[in-house]
Amino acid sequence: MGLFERIKENWFLIGIIVVILAARAEPSIGAKGGPLIPEITIKYLAVSLIFFNSGLSLKSEDLKSALLHVRLHCFVQLFTLAFIPCLIWFLIKLLSHTAIDEWLLKGLQVVGCMPPPVSSAVILTKAVGGNEAAAIFNSAFGSFLGIIVTPVLLLLFMGSSSSVPFSSIISQLSMTVVVPVIVGQIARRYIKDWLERTKPPFGQIGKAVLLLIIYSTFCDTFSNPSLQINHYSLIAIAIIVLLLQMSLLLATFLLSRMALFGFTPADTVAIMFCSTHKSLTLGIPMLKIVFAGYDHLSILSIPLLVYHPTQILLGGVLVDYVRNWMLSAEKSKHQMTSI
């Protein structure tokens, strides 16, 4: 693969680095009161556009085909939206006695509260040859659930900013998250044929808008000289995120193979990726709403920014190994039933 193809394939990860460096170079452009006017363009327009884009791209018709696999859906949603937040809360209690920056640790809790992403878990499940319908359902259903559950989890585990009352958070979530998703789903019904025919690059559009939100968030940080973060904490968080993902993948694999659940090897593949992946696309805009007024907002978002590329890279490394396991497991199962 040539250099241009590599850049094209990883443009979003490169974009995150570029916008953070740009924010560092001249933070006044995207900071509050700056020429970008983030109080309107980011807080309302960009966030609403991301969720309208999600509503428009979510194939609700695909959800029906996988609807009846209730046991699998319950496993995925309870693992990702109940078990992981509680596990990370306990982990943070242990890590709070170390020298790691407390706001980065709180950022780990943010990661735990996030819903599954709409794309990466499905792409990896498809690449392995697992239960793609289940992956599509749980990614989409998890995103819908996350609109309600994630803000509640964030407020439950971390509390809200004193400068933003709870009623204001709920009303803003409704206007910039729930309404755009519903409008997107309604619009999809009327232009479904056109969408199927033209296949607009929803993922690329969402990521481009997300880069703008990340840029503005870090502009606010770098315009506040009192906020400092040590390199030890950053390295420690990166290592913790990697070990956490590997542990979660192993846990979902072992649990889903237990006979009492009755999952097939293809189901296990979908469970592994859907249960352990977390959404950056939905996460960053939600953080902007729930923690508006926090000086440490960008530091809170760092673990999520680390988690996103890690889950994609780790998933990519595992694809061949998981596929080989799945094929041999299905072959063994077939031989057992034919005896």
Image (cartoon, rainbow, N blue to C red):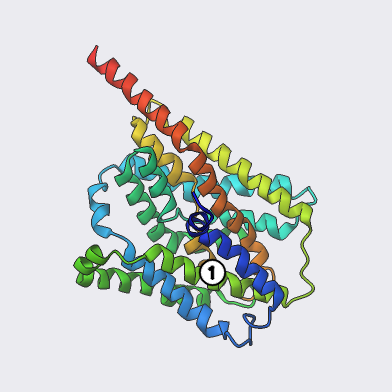
Seen in the image, is 111 located left or right of residue 101? left
Residue 265, quarter of picture:
top left
Expressed as whole percent of the image width and height from the top left, the position of residue 333 reads: 31, 21
For mark 1, what is the residue? 211
Seen in the image, is 102 located left or right of residue 63? right
Expressed as whole percent of the image width and height from the top left, the position of residue 254 reads: 48, 30
Work out which residue is located at the far front of the displayed protein and give it: 2
Residue 304, quarter of picture:
bottom right
Work out which residue is located at the far top of the displayed protein and give it: 339
Q: For the point 48% across and 80% down, which residue is it? A: 44
Residue density around tag 1, few if under 14, some if 14–19, many if 20 or more, within 10 Å = many
Amino acid beneath label 1: Leu
Expressed as whole percent of the image width and height from the top left, the position of residue 318 reads: 49, 37
Q: Where 256 sits versus 231, above or below?
A: above
Residue 20, quarter of picture:
bottom right
Could one spot residue 17 in this view of the protein?
Answer: yes
- Element type at marker 1? helix
Q: For the point 61% across and 70% down, which residue is it? A: 19
Q: Nearer the viewer, residue 257 or 157?
A: 257
Could one spot residue 289 in this view of the protein?
Answer: no
Seen in the image, is 17 located left or right of residue 169? right
Expressed as whole percent of the image width and height from the top left, the position of residue 327 reads: 36, 27
Q: Nearer the viewer, residue 180 or 193?
A: 193
Q: Nearer the viewer, residue 203 or 2?
A: 2
Q: For the point 79% across and 58% down, which residue is it? A: 230
Q: Quadrant of the C terminus?
A: top left
Seen in the image, is 122 located left or right of residue 2? left
